[in-house]
Image: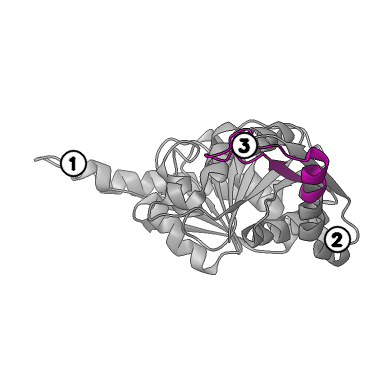
Amino acid sequence: MIIVGVDGSVTARAAVEWAVNDALRMGEPLRIVHAVDRSPYQIGRFPNAALPDALRREGQRILREALALAHERQPDVEVTTRDIEGAPAEVLREQAKDAAEIVLGSRGLGGFAGALLGSVSAHVAGHVGCPVVVVRGDHQPVRGEIVVGVDDSPACEPALVYAFQQAELRRSTLRVVHAWQLPVHAYAPEAPYDMDEVRTAQHQTVRDRVGTFKRDYPQVTVVEDVQPAQPVEALTDASTRADLLVVGSHGHGAAGALLLGSVSRGVLYHTRCPVAVVRA
């Protein structure tokens, strides 16, 4: 099942369109979820008694509009709706237990707002086991390419699995980006390097990572993009020509933003295309 969070915003509408299209490709049902978060309105000496009903009615309106949009875009997809009380990030994290994918907009009005710069996407992508896709509100032309970032750790393999699956479903080219930088040694900052040897090793890193996947997904055309660059800059640049950017998430720490890791946080800030964060 694919879960999409909605709050009535423009980016939530874009998230519904993205999610229902992906549900059709993956053969999954779609569940549209709205979080009824009363906590910001429960502060003060004189709470508004009519507010809970107003929040509920607004949530039902948002769900009706999202359901109509999903049916309009892909009438063959099975779609259900859920109106759930609770903080947005907590609601989505609970829903993720039976989800193949979570989709949410990058910015909103409330409910699932602030994904790009705020706490919702960090706490969802940083804590759930399924891929989390963050969608921008602006429509982009279909480019026929998916980008995935890889490094020299096994933790990037779940992102590769998701990226190859998406590329196969969409019949898209898959660009595998590996950006590398020379290490700086504290006691020998000007230590010489054999650049040809370094480049060969970096290319071998990518070949080792994608070799098995190429055999498992023979119909996917793979472009190995190995470059000396800062990872966020390389991925952001590649995303300008992509329909989807896929990154792994293997940071450390108790907070969601730290669990995301610096690269996944960076691309969420800067890229224009949808971003899928796949936890290791």
Q: Residue 162: x percent and y percent?
A: 70, 58
- Does residue 143 appear left or right of residue 12 in this picture? right
Residue at the location (68% across, 44% down)? 245
Residue at the location (20% across, 45% down)? 42
Residue beneath label 3, please? Answer: 232
Closest to the observer, 108 or 114: 114
Residue at the location (74% across, 44% down)? 177
Q: Quadrant of the N terminus?
A: bottom right
Residue beneath label 2, please? Answer: 214
Closest to the observer, 89 or 80: 89
Q: Quadrant of residue 254?
A: bottom left
Q: Which mark is residue 48?
A: 1
Q: Secondary structure at mark 3?
A: helix
The mark closer to the camera, 1 or 2, is 2
- Does residue 150 appear left or right of residue 268 in this picture? right
Q: Residue 27: x percent and y percent?
A: 72, 64
Q: Which mark is residue 93?
A: none
Q: Quadrant of the C terminus?
A: bottom right
- Report the magenta residues as a range: 176-201
- Does residue 247 appear left or right of residue 266 in this picture? right
Q: Residue 178: x percent and y percent?
A: 73, 45
Closest to the observer, 9 or 256: 256
